[in-house]
Image (tube, rainbow, N blue to C red):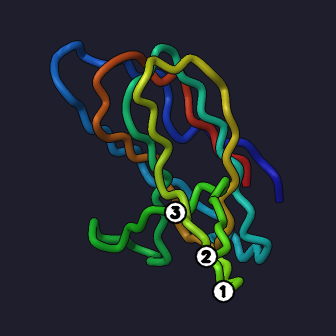
Amino acid sequence: MSDTILILGQNNHAGAGSQTLTGEKFAGDARFGATDGLHTFEINLTNFIGKIKIQATLASEPNEQDWFDADVGNSSQTIDTTGLVQSASKTSIVYTDAETSVNAYNVTGNMVWVRAYVTDWTEGSISSIKMNR
């Protein structure tokens, strides 16, 4: 199944201090019995400063404590002097300078529900966050 869903529409910073925004829950792949677990998120920003997370849950009827920060891909790997590979997952997208862009991020997991979570938002606007599952 492949369809695109708007999970967070137009939101503008109110202009005072740091804001937090929690999006509504939307069905992930596991809700439909899909097994590939691939979700792609398109994040469209204008002069945005803040932190964006994609959160997910495996619970059918989640409480606030059921949500976790999903790995938004683009993780980095390092190899130490013994040859051990270490991965650093990336669970948030951080913009410290005003960002105007449209970027895509892949999240893999058989998640029942997903949502957008924005913190430390001090400037700019979110034009949209869309999910293709």
Distance of label 3 from label 1 (alpha carbons): 29 Å
Q: Residue 82 carries which label?
A: 1
Q: Is residue 108 left or right of residue 67?
A: right
At label 2, counting other C-alpha atoms closer than 10 Å, the crowd grade (few under 14, some 14-19, many 20 or more) is: few
Q: Can residue 18 be seen in this view?
A: yes
Measured as percent of width and height from the top left, residue 13 is found at: 31, 19
User: Which is nearer the N-term, disc 3 or disc 1?
Assistant: 3
- The reply to whether the C-beta atoms of the residues labelled 1 and 2 are less than 8 Å apart is no
Q: In this view, does 9 lie to the left or right of 33?
A: left
Q: In this view, does 31 lie above or below 107?
A: below
User: Type of residue at label 2?
Assistant: Gln
Q: Is residue 39 left or right of residue 56?
A: right
Judging from the image, what secondary structure is the residue with disc 2 in? Answer: strand
User: Which is nearer the N-term, disc 3 or disc 2?
Assistant: 3
Q: In this view, does 105 lie to the left or right of 112?
A: right
Q: Is residue 115 visible?
A: no
- Name the residue carrying label 2: 86
Q: In this view, does 19 lie above or below 34?
A: above
